[in-house]
Amino acid sequence: MRNKMIAWVAGVVSIVVILMVIIVTMEPPKDGITRAQAFKAMALAVTTKDECSRREKERGSSRFSAKEKDNWFVKYMDYLYDEGYLDEEMTTPSLSTAQGYLTYQEAAFMAGQVSNKLKLQAGATKHNRDRAFPEEEWWRLYEGILSQTDPDGAVKTVDAVLYGTPSNLPQAESWTAYTTEGNFGFQGLALDAYLDCEIQFLARDGEMIAMRQLISEDVVYENIWLAESDGRHFKAYLGTAYREFPVSDKMGDVTDMAGNLADLHMEGGKLRKITMKRERISGKVLSVTDNAIEIEGYGEIPLSENFHVYKVYGDFKVLGAKDILVGYDLQEFVAAEGKLCAALLEREFDAKTIRVLLMDTGFKSLYHPSATLVLGGAAQMEYENSKGKTEKERLEAGTQLTVAPDDERLKYGRIIITPEGDEGIAVPTIERSQGTPVYSGKMEIKACEEGLVLVNDLFLEDYLTRVVPSEMPPSYEKEALKAQAVCARTYAYRQIQGNSYSQYGAHVDDSTNFQVYNNTNPDERTTQAVKETYGKMLFYEDNPIDAFYFSTSCGHTADVSVWGTDADKLPYLQAVEVKSGRRTLGQGDNDKFDSYIRNSDASAYDSSFAMFRWETDISSDIISAQVSGAGKVTDMTVVSRGPGGIASELQVTGSDGTVTVKGQSAIRSALGSSSLVITKQDGKTMEGSQTLPSAFISIEKRSGEDGSISFHVYGGGFGHGVGMSQNGAQGMAKEGKDYTAILSFFYNGTELREIGN
């Protein structure tokens, strides 16, 4: 009996040992990494998620079965199979394989495709080849892989607070993580345990690769907009998404929460405290920089580290500081502890005024060593003193005011001069075509390190009366002038929205960088054209258009692809023939462009203008000096053309090799020179400039008896060729077309509307 008992116990022990061995053998190790995660990381070490998706679509098939090919990891694994980082015999393409753990053999194989050194680092042997590769060892190996495959650092380490995933944001997109550093895809990762925590992760081009560590469970969401509250819950906007939070008496003063700003204090994923921010200020914005906003009556106020811009009228939106328009009072600012925490945009801007940065004589610089102003009528001058108070001083008509950068009145802000009547302000330290320019509206002077900047703040319609005669001869037909006025107004509206000079407190400058302003005196005919089109702009699908225009066509226009922009984004700007019928031009028309541009008898609305056709000769020496890398130039050919026939690629061959110049702007600069003599079709000549008149060209190589090489250029048109030809508009007006027909011709599918309607 005793022996039977011993045998029975021994048998039980043996069975337990066998079971333990089986469990240890069969259960994956706890510290491994799934193949799906590792293969995603490997793919993103060498390419982007978008490229994997593009390759998947282009391939049209998968190594996975039809039942499994829609899994998130398939595109990454198929990419790695394609590129030789995975072997199908070693790693079979299946769901069960992807869900299993990466082995030493597989890690070594992938690393070996990058370098032998990395293969050795993986440490695969015949004894461990089928064992799971430890996760931490994988990430150490991954660092080495990145050093070889990602020298430019496309894979980045990101520290951010995770505030949303589809589990807590009903409006969240699938597999999207919402963080304080932006939104990221997170396919294959589990993140919900880290909500409302600061984490560190690896990412490439908006896709998370791996969660690396938890940084903190205590976070503060600063300057958050509280949208709604019912006393028990409130809605808060965190970044671009909103969440609902419960309210309790322990959180501080939470009365009248809706429509206010607050800091939300989180501990361990729970809301513990709310700090309301109720102080508000408002006023016209005078300038916006990365670190401060200048507000009329307050001076420059620094921005808090987490400054936000919220659009609170209509549909709520989270915007950026670039959306705060200078020259307008469209928002309230929330302030705390001497800093601006947020801007609350409360109404749409009406484009009634525009702020123009005045360049120096010759339009060479934004900065002036000094400025002299002569008042045409009485005016009020304002500036800030050392106590932040506004000093006001009345100046009589005829007063001459000279300001230098070290003027005491500029020490704490800018000088603002506001005329009491309609009389303008002359600036004799600036010279323009008409002599000393006179400006209507306010004049502001601000000191910068480089000198003074002058900003003219005036009504948009007054601005246009000084733009149109500077851009189009007042002697042109009234319908052409009206078309120009609408284009100028639409263009100005877009530039106000663009806010390009917000750091100086301006929207545009007065040069050809935008629209030439006040270079010639206002004219009765152009002023009438502005008045008769008051407030009218061109719209496409409810948005003001990019109303590009240029001087003269070659008989063809181009589209925005001349600047590398997708032409489909601005479909109203098309390559067409500038004549009755408005035939749209395609790539097939370019085969005949050389003969077309050399034909002086081509017909178009602007074919009677001198710059419709022109020619010039360019020496090899000029091109050799201006095209680097080619050496002594021996040949030059247009090898590619864009819509309308405009040159898009120029091949330049020389003693040092062949160089390709791409883009119409670069081509015009490469071939331009002030030493050129350009012969217009009327036989008259003009001096060249730093750029050719246009890139609608054909080139003919010529050799001199002395062995010298030059290039004869047949050209047509003046300007970039996109949008409205001003001389084409004049030709149409002479044929009896009104301004609406002219605009419809050059801006296809657009609608004429009055601002505010």
Image (cartoon, grey):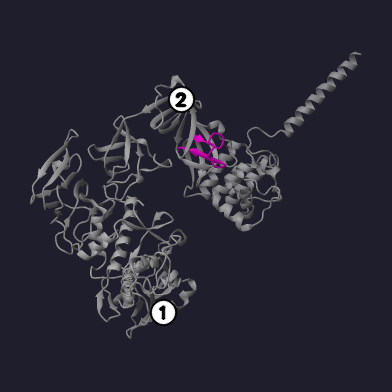
- The label shown at residue 198 is none
Residue at the image position 20 percent from the left and 46 percent from the top: 446
Q: Position of residue 581 (x, y in %)?
A: 43, 74
- Foreground of the two, 626 or 62: 62
Mark 1 lies on a secondary structure that is: helix
Q: What's under tag 2, amino acid-wise?
A: Gly
Is residue 628 shown to the viewer in this render?
no
Marks 1 & 2, CB-CB < 8 Å contact: no
| Badge 2 density bin: few <14, some 14–19, many ≥20, Cα 10 Å | some
Q: Position of residue 200 (x, y in %)?
A: 49, 36
Mark count: 2
- Foreground of the two, 755 or 307: 755
Is residue 686 shown to the viewer in this render?
yes
Residue at the image position 23 percent from the left and 59 percent from the top: 465
Q: What's under tag 1, amino acid-wise?
A: Tyr
Q: Position of residue 1 (x, y in %)?
A: 92, 13
Specify start and end residues of the magenta stretch as a single range: 162-180
Mark 2 lies on a secondary structure that is: loop
Disc 1 designates what residue?
596
- Foreground of the two, 103 or 115: 103
| Occupied quadrant, residue 4 | top right
- Residue projecting furthest to the bottom: 705
Magenta segment main secondary structure: loop
- The label shown at residue 231 is 2
Disc number lying in front (1 or 2):
2
- Residue projecting furthest to the right: 1
| Figure check: 332 above or below 720 | above
Q: In the image, 285: left or right of 571?
A: left
| Figure check: 486 above or below 442 | below
| Badge 1 density bin: few <14, some 14–19, many ≥20, Cα 10 Å | some
| Occupied quadrant, residue 712 | bottom left
